[in-house]
Image (cartoon, rainbow, N blue to C red):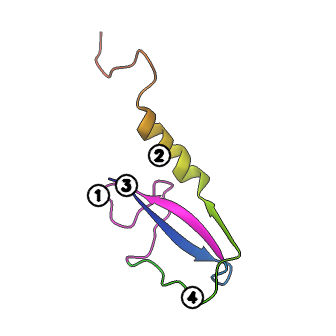
């Protein structure tokens, strides 16, 4: 199972959503090391939110599996 975690930037007014790697502690699929505990949101709503593109690309590759014709079995 994968977990999504939002981390704040720019003085806690902008959230970036990362995908945490399976069984890798606080390492996101993009390689970013997240704090052990998620950041506690402040009282204000974030101005913007977006998803980490490298995390989304890596997750998409995991979900899609290997390209057609590549089963991992050598001929």
Element class at badge 2: helix
Residue at image mark 2? 59
**Earlier-in-chain disc, 2 versus 1:** 1
Please tell me the numbered disc located at residue 2: 3
Displayed quadrant of residue 72: top left
Q: Is residue 35 left or right of residue 6?
A: left
- In this picture, is 38 found above or below 16? below
- Separation of marks 3 and 2 at Cα, in angstroms: 9 Å
Residue marked by disc 4? 42
Crowding near the residue tagged with mark 3, few <14, some 14–19, many ≥20 C-alpha atoms within 10 Å: few
Task: Residue lying at the far right in this picture: please name it.
Answer: 47
Q: Measuring 63% from the left and 82% from the top, which residue is drawn there? A: 12
Callout 2 touching callout 1 (CB < 8 Å): no
Contact check, label 3 and label 2, Cβ < 8 Å: yes
Q: Which residues are magenta?
A: 14-36
43 in magenta: no
Q: Residue furthest top?
A: 75
Residue 11 in the image, given as x and y percentages of width and height: 66, 84
Residue 71: percent from left, percent from top: 33, 20
- Give the CA separation, mark 2 to mark 1: 14 Å
Residue at the image position 51 percent from the left and 61 percent from the top: 18
Q: Which residue is mark 1?
A: 23
Which numbered mark, 4 or 2, is in the foreground of this view?
A: 4
Q: Is residue 60 shown above or below 47?
A: above
Q: Answer few, some or many: residues within 10 Å of disc 2's Cα (few below 14, many 20 plus, some between 14 and 19).
A: some
CA gap between label 4 and label 3 equals 25 Å
Q: Nearer the viewer, mark 1 or mark 3?
A: 3
Compute the Cα span from label 1 to label 3.
Answer: 9 Å
């Amino acid at each position: 199972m994968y977990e999504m975690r939002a981390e704040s930037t720019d003085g806690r007014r902008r959230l970036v959503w990362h995908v945490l790697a399976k069984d890798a502690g606080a390492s996101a699929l993009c390689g970013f090391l997240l704090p052990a505990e998620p950041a506690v949101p402040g009282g204000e709503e974030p101005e913007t939110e977006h998803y980490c593109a490298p995390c989304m690309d890596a997750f998409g590759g995991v979900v899609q599996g290997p390209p057609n014709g590549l089963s991992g079995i050598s001929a």
